[in-house]
Image (spheres, helix red, strand yellow):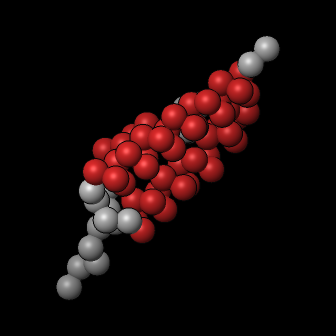
Amino acid sequence: METPAPPVDRMLQFFRFDHLPAPLRDVSRPFAELADLIVVSLPSNPERTVCLRKLLEAKDCAVRARLFE
């Protein structure tokens, strides 16, 4: 019997951070890790999607805070 694949959510594509410069990668990584945890821990439903969307908003704000001059 094969091991089932981990759950996937299309929202996770927006949490990718490997393409970012190091300072922004460091800011983004914890948000990606939390998004992964949410996807494997919570059932897929509209509230999980809202949760990920709000986490994405927070990640974007954190990245902008790092870029702020």
Where the C terminus falls, by quadrant? top right
Q: Is residue 27 above or below residue 66?
A: below
The reply to whether residue 55 is visible in this rendering is: yes
Q: Is residue 62 above or below residue 11?
A: above
Residue sitting at 61 percent across and 40 percent down? 28
Q: Residue furthest bottom?
A: 1
Q: Is residue 4 left or right of residue 31?
A: left
**In the image shown, does 4 or 32 lie closer to the viewer?**
32
Q: Residue furthest left?
A: 1
Q: Is residue 68 above or below residue 24?
A: above
Q: Residue furthest top?
A: 69
Residue sitting at 34 percent across and 53 percent down? 47
The reply to whether residue 15 is visible in this rendering is: no
Residue sitting at 36 percent across and 54 percent down? 48
The picture places residue 31, in percent across and down from the top left corner, at 57, 47
Q: Residue furthest front?
A: 47
Residue sitting at 62 percent across and 50 percent down? 30
The picture places residue 4, in percent across and down from the top left corner, at 27, 73
Q: How many marks?
A: 0
Where the N terminus falls, by quadrant? bottom left
The picture places residue 10, in percent across and down from the top left corner, at 31, 44
The picture places residue 54, in percent across and down from the top left corner, at 47, 41
Q: Is residue 67 above or below residue 62?
A: above
